[in-house]
Image (cartoon, rainbow, N blue to C red):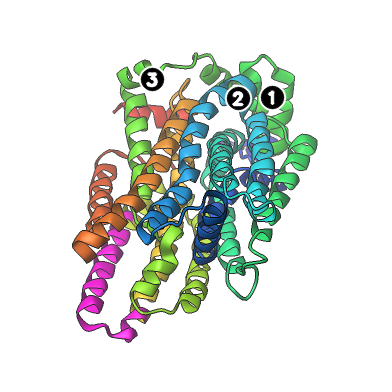
Amino acid sequence: MKVVPLDDSFESSPRLTSRLLGTSIVSSLAGGFHFGYLISAVNPLSAILEQFIVDKIRIRYSFILSSSQLSILWSSLAGCLFIGAMVGSYLSVHLLSRIGPRKTLLTAATILLFSTPLFGFAYSLNLVELLPISRILSGIGLAIGISAQGVFITEISPAKFRGMTNSLSGLIGNIAFVLAASLGTPYLLGTVSLWKYMFFIETIPCIAHVILNISMFHDSPKYLLSIGKSIEAERSLYTYYGKSCQVKMVLEDLRSETATENKTLREVLKDKAASRALSLSVAINFSVAFSGIAAISFFGTFLLQNVGFSPEGSAVANSLCSSSSILSALLAAIAIDKIGRRPLLISSLLILALINILMMSLVFLYDSTKDPLLAWPFLGLFVLFTFVFSIGIGPAAVFIGAELATPGTISKMQSYSTSVQFIGSFISPVIYFSLVESVGGLAFLLFIVPLAVTATYIFMYLPETKGKTPVEIHDLLRK
């Protein structure tokens, strides 16, 4: 019987360090937090903000908006976030390769530090024009941050903890979503005179990230090796993997990955493993945009009012149902490295499709009966939807591009896949509410079909990546 020395067995297993956990959480303060906060904040404030827009345009331009014009303007304002996000996704490709993920996160937090309070200053300065400017700039910042956090957390995490550390960004995003939904109720800051403070508060996580990033973060060891800083890469590994890991062996693996030059999009599409990774990542992010979450996030109170809730009751109900996402995000952080990505993704896609079918049925039933009691089962489906979304495709979409990326493609993979989500999130609510007016409940097919098709595609082609090294994932994608 061969006896393994205690030191060797101890060194072979990286541990989950408090520094890694803390860094993963703080990284989300420059990306995932703002995504959750900004898409949720305007939902409970819709009536107040619409009136603010009508009043200021009437005073400044002597123009009275019709209800249809206001509807278009409001949808466009909400969508400005994703217009900025498309630009941010493009910029992140170049920032990640030139300054690395840590400084890219710092750039995102700095942009958000200045862009988010502009929304509140629109009220203070009586400048309605600041609203779209703030949304576009904030979209740029959060897209850069989300792309960078996925790359950064993936590159600083040992394979066995990669799913959990990346899922923490989903948890932070859900907490931010619930925070904004709660603050926006009429009982807190959702009033004519106080709503501006919701956007001033958003600077707090930006400041926290900037301070901690500068004072405590090490850049990813992979990036440090790519620019010839081997000593700093070794120090980074010790910090995030723990002093018990086999640093020399990990460094050698990373050197073999960084030896590959960054690939162009044409080269990505010609490579079997890289093109499959890109198609899978794009499919997952597309399904997020067309799952129904964008419509719920922006217009959740409107949907609840359509099935019988009062305006005040719908705002409170929307806030309460959003709270379920925090519990599911906690479960996702635990389950994703135990159950695996593949079963969580496939099951969540199919369950979300079923929930959309049930919502569609309830809308038809309510339209024919006008029974106010149907509001409660609809609310129950709302809660179940956010729960399932936040334990499956929600957190996975944030990092799946970075995890599947083959050598030389990580920045492009992450940026291209998230940009698809942002484009889809801009388009899907617009299409959905246009369809509601023409076909009613059948508009839910816009979500049901993409969810079912994506589940089938993932079942056929997505390998299980739980605990796998980049080399092992690359080999699975080539089969």
Q: State which tag comes first along the sequence, 2 or 1.
A: 2
* Amino acid tagged 2: Lys
Q: Secondary structure at mark 1?
A: helix
**Residue 429 horizontal side relative to residue 215, left or right:** left
Label 2 crowding class (10 Å Cα cut-off): few <14, some 14-19, many 20+?
Answer: many
Q: Mark 3 to mark 1: distance in Å?
A: 28 Å
Residue 246, visible in the rendered structure: no
Residue 23 appears at what percent x and percent y? Answer: 68, 43
Circles 2 and 1 in contact, beta carbons < 8 Å? yes
Residue 152 appears at what percent x and percent y? Answer: 59, 35
**Residue 291 horizontal side relative to residue 453, left or right:** right
Badge 1 is on which residue?
233
**Residue 169 horizontal side relative to residue 413, left or right:** right
Circles 2 and 3 in contact, beta carbons < 8 Å? no
Residue 107 appears at what percent x and percent y? Answer: 66, 33
170 in relation to 181, above or below: above
Q: State which tag comes first along the sequence, 3 or 1.
A: 1
Q: Mark 2 to mark 1: distance in Å?
A: 7 Å
Residue 95 appears at what percent x and percent y? Answer: 58, 25
Q: Residue at x 44, y 68 (%)?
A: 301
Q: Mark 2 to mark 3: distance in Å?
A: 21 Å
Specify the segment rendered in magenta: 349-375
Badge 3 is on which residue?
265
Q: Residue at x 28, y 55 (%)?
A: 434
User: Residue 357: within the magenta?
Assistant: yes
Badge 2 is on which residue?
222
